[in-house]
């Protein structure tokens, strides 16, 4: 059982837990499923998140150190990672 403190929905759904972990569920395009699963980013604790809306399936999260991570569809470079490759896991934006 997870203690959810924040929920965001858009092209898929995500929740932030009191343990500072992210759960995702939805279409399955980027690892989401109908049952929430934990996004594993070893050693990272998150404090906030947002989900894109519309055709672009992506998420953005901020960790407890203020660093920004993104994941999902990246056809238009919306992940801010300097390329157009999709990411299944949150990837730190440099």
Image: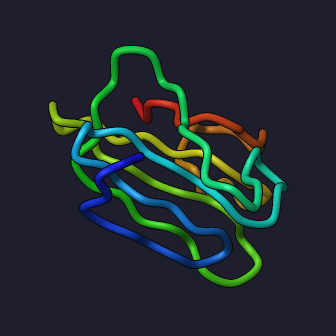
Q: Residue at x 34, y 15 (%)?
A: 43
Is 54 located above or below residue 49 in the figure? Answer: below
Q: Residue furthest top?
A: 43
Where is residue 28? Give x, y as percent.
82, 56
- Tell me which colouring the rendered structure shows: rainbow
Q: Residue at x 61, y 53 (%)?
A: 36
* Res. 20 in view: yes
Where is residue 70? Give x, y as percent.
51, 45
Q: Residue at x 39, y 69 (%)?
A: 7
Instruction: Locate residue 26 relative to residue 19 in the image: left or right.
Output: right
**Count of marks, rendered view:** 0
Where is residue 63? Give x, y as percent.
26, 37
Where is residue 94? Give x, y as percent.
40, 29
Q: Quadrant of residue 13?
A: bottom right
Q: Residue at x 33, y 24 (%)?
A: 44
Q: Residue furthest left?
A: 65
């Amino acid at each position: 059982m997870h203690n959810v403190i924040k929920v965001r929905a858009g092209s898929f759904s995500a929740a932030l837990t009191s343990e500072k972990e992210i759960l995702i569920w939805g279409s399955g395009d980027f690892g989401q499923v109908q049952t929430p699963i934990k996004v594993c980013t070893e050693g990272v604790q998150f404090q906030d998140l947002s989900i894109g809306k519309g055709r672009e399936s992506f998420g953005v999260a901020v960790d407890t150190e203020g660093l920004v991570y993104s994941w999902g569809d990246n056809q238009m470079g919306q992940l801010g990672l300097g390329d157009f490759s999709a990411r299944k896991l949150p990837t730190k934006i440099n």
